[in-house]
Amino acid sequence: MKGPLKVVLGIVTSICGFIEVGSMSTSAQAGAEFGMRLLWAIAIATICLIFLVEMSGRIALVSKHTLVSAVRERFGFRFQAVPLGAEIVLDTLVLAAEIGGACVALQLVTGISYRWLAIPVGLLVWGLLWLGTFSLIENGVSALGMVTLAFVVATFVLRPDWRAVASGLVPSLPKASGSLPRYGFLAVSILGATISPYLVNFYSSGAIEEHWGEKDFWPNRITAALGMGFGSVVSAAVLVVAALTLAPRGIRVEAFQQGALMLVPPFGSWGVPLFAAALFVGCLGAALEVALNLAYALSQSLGWNWGEDQKPHEDARFSLVYTAAILAGSLIMAAGLNPLKLTLFSMALTVVVLPLVVLPFLELMNDPHYLRTYRNGWIGNLVVLVVLVAAFLLALVVIPLEVVGGG
Amino acid sequence: MADDMHLVRDLLDKQLVDRDGRLMGKVDGIVIQPRRGKAPRVTAIETGAVVLGARLHPAIGRRVERLLARLTKRAAEPVRVPLEKILHRGLEIQVEVDARRTSALALERWLAEKIVGRIPGGRP
């Protein structure tokens, strides 16, 4: 595929990969409970994500080794074993949450309980991976994902006070001091939902799947910046719409059914089906990516043969890893776990794993064996250092916040 | 010296590929032979889930071995490649070996045949 088209496609994919159950539910809850006040969390998290994603793409396109592969090779298995194990557990939970989100979307329009839909949706995810190719999955998800732009359209239809939107980009504390733990919990959940380790690793593997090389140095930068940037615009739009429609009516998002109401004021009877379509497509896309990422991470750490473009019998270990993960995710949902609770829980848990994911960047991105002349400059290293320190601090407060503010 | 080879830095945990570029696993272990009256000699590199498991804890190694042996005996055998067979050493370690003739792909092939082949769409 030619350069510019590839970049455009990459950007569209990122937008649609961005808006999934995690960012949708954290943004909706934040908007419903605190108005525009938490927009800054999305903005800051997006900037961090852009830097990390660009780096994970860069190391792959220069060295032809993905981030997970490089961490194993450079730091050894003993260093990697703990973060890898944590990521496998976390990815399985997130996968279950995404499958759950897609099931809830179907429940909104059909009325059939999400528990009964978990196995069919899991089969759909698995079938697409088993029979499809990387580009089919990427292009299919991006084409369908255009529906998530409904939130951006809704924002303009609702004519927000742009000064209030802008002031939300500046961090501030909530008015009622009693709501501080909840505010903190949602801020951390937004960070976890946005800076997802799976996205960073997936992007690195995607660069290999698409045969990126050194000539893709700038396309990688542009895709990372614009793709993640626009993606977060959709995420911010969800927050703004929730702030304008749910907050004034005192509706808190305790289940997706309440979240679905946010598109009713701008779109009338089309509101709920549109919300359901956006949720379904976003979650389906994310489920495909998380399942693949789990198989990528394990295969690359152990040096197995991997790739979505190979037939399942050519990389049997890789294919059976995502098969097992999807089965586990579907069963968790079929057992009747609350999808929204699981989502918020796993987003907060992401923050605990984050320092271990970010730490290797400091060393690897300056390693001439991997990056040759494409090593990090001082800006890149400074951002990594700031994210690392922030992630450590957040990891310390997330457990108490989970207890006090999670309910 | 530029030609020095550091076992942990330059060999351990690197990606192992065969002469045709097939991925054989990572370098999970290094074999050193003690010799009476002489300095010990590095003889080979090893790859295999059992070697890797044993690096975390010997009990994990034994567990992995029992588990794999139950599926197929061959998958539990580590692959040992003598140092002389190393063709190229960089981010990858390329060795003068045909991966298909070793046990490196034994589990892959067993799973492809016994499980993937029996699932619709999984047959070659």
Image (cartoon, rainbow, N blue to C red):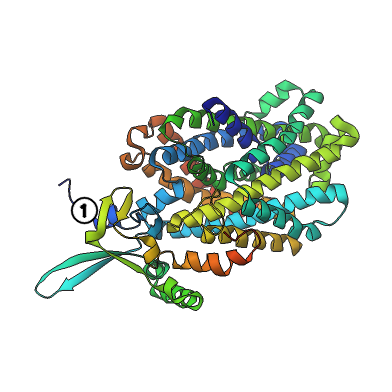
Q: Is residue A46 visible?
A: yes
Q: Position of residue A244 (x, y in %)?
A: 80, 31
Please state which amino acid type lies under the numbered disc 1.
Answer: Met
Q: Which residue lies under the disc numbered 1?
A: B5
Residue at the location (55% across, 25% down)?
A: A4
Q: Is residue B41 above or below residue B23?
A: below
Q: Position of residue A252 (x, y in %)?
A: 80, 44
Which image quadrant for residue B99?
Answer: bottom left
Which image quadrant for residue A330?
Answer: bottom right
Looking at the image, residue B32 sits to the left or right of residue A297; the answer is left
Residue at the location (33% across, 32% down)?
A: A373
Q: Position of residue A353 (x, y in %)?
A: 53, 52
Looking at the image, residue A340 sits to the left or right of residue B60; the answer is right
The chain carrying label 1 is B
Q: Position of residue A117 (x, y in %)?
A: 79, 57
Q: Quadrant of the image for the N terminus of chain A? A: top right
- Residue that lies at the very extreme toward the front in this rendered image: B124
Nearer to us in this view, A29 or A194: A194
Nearer to us in this view, A401 or A299: A299
